[in-house]
Amino acid sequence: RFKLGEREWPNTLKMTMPGRGALQKFLADAKREHATHAVLEATSEGIRQSRHRAVAWDALVLTNVTPEHIESHGSFEKYRRAKEKLFKYLSKTYRKAEIPKVMVVNADDPSRDRFLRYDADKKITYSAKEYEVAFEDGGMRILAPEGVEMRSKLTGAFNLANIAAAIALARALNIGWDEIKRGIEKVAVVAVRME
């Protein structure tokens, strides 16, 4: 799905990561609507087709590298190398040089060191294992390693891992705990996921 402010519409392009023209149009529309940040999902297939090259990335998050899309890439190693291209590209982003480049990597992923070897101004690792969680009817209660408690309407270990990634990125971007907690507690559902 695409979302700009309060407007939301389905992705009918049949690809998670659109081509360079569509990405640039989306980012230009976001800028016209005074957006200060954009969140894009970069896929291994999109990276392999160089769709990432039109974007001046400021931060990247690696959630995991699992053996998927092998049929498209030919092997797990080629699949992982495709994802690594984006991390290598981060340090070569020439626009917005005054903005520190941030890399957030899942410490629990066996491929973490492969990604952490690339240049960035800030390198942050996170682990969902550092969070205390109680799964409840209608969501989960989460205690962050820093002692901040919050509730999420989402459930499941994969959502906890995604929340941990989002918190790590937010903290790396100097977003305060009050705002992080408010955002996590506001999300009731991730559209088209488990609906």
Image (cartoon, rainbow, N blue to C red):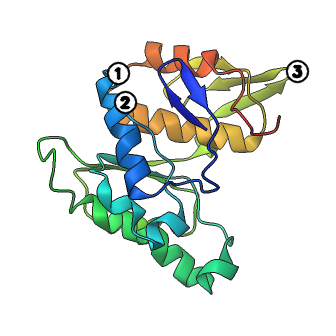
Image location of residue 191, percent across then percent down = 70, 32
Number of numbered discs overlaid on the protein picture: 3
In depth, the one of 142 and 88 nearer the eye is 88
Which residue is located at x 64 percent, y 55 percent?
14
- The residue positioned farthest toward the right in the image shown: 137
Q: Which residue is mark 1?
A: 33
Q: What is the CA distance from the residue labelled 3 to the residue labelled 1?
A: 38 Å
Q: Secondary structure at mark 3?
A: loop
Image location of residue 31, percent across then percent down = 30, 29
Q: Does residue 184 lie above or below 14 as drawn?
A: above
Q: Secondary structure at mark 1?
A: loop
Q: Earlier in the sequence, mark 3 or mark 2?
A: 2
In depth, the one of 69 and 50 nearer the eye is 50
Q: What is the CA distance from the residue labelled 1 to the residue labelled 2?
A: 5 Å
Which corner quadrant of the image does residue 115 belong to?
bottom left
Q: Which residue is mark 3?
A: 137
Q: Amino acid at mark 3?
A: Asp
Q: Are marks 3 and 1 in contact (CB under 8 Å)?
A: no
In depth, the one of 45 and 107 nearer the eye is 45
Query: Left or right: where does residue 186 sit relative to residue 47?
Result: right
Classed neighbour count for the residue bearing mark 2: other residues with Cα under 10 Å, few (<14), some (14–19), many (≥20): some
Which dot, 3 or 2, sits closer to the camera?
A: 2
Which residue is located at x 41 percent, y 31 percent?
170
Query: Left or right: where does residue 92 sit relative to residue 60?
Result: left
Classed neighbour count for the residue bearing mark 1: other residues with Cα under 10 Å, few (<14), some (14–19), many (≥20): few
Q: Amino acid at mark 1?
A: Glu
Q: Which residue is mark 2?
A: 30
Would you say residue 37 is visible in this rendering?
no
Which residue is located at x 69 percent, y 32 percent?
190
Q: Amino acid at mark 2?
A: Ala
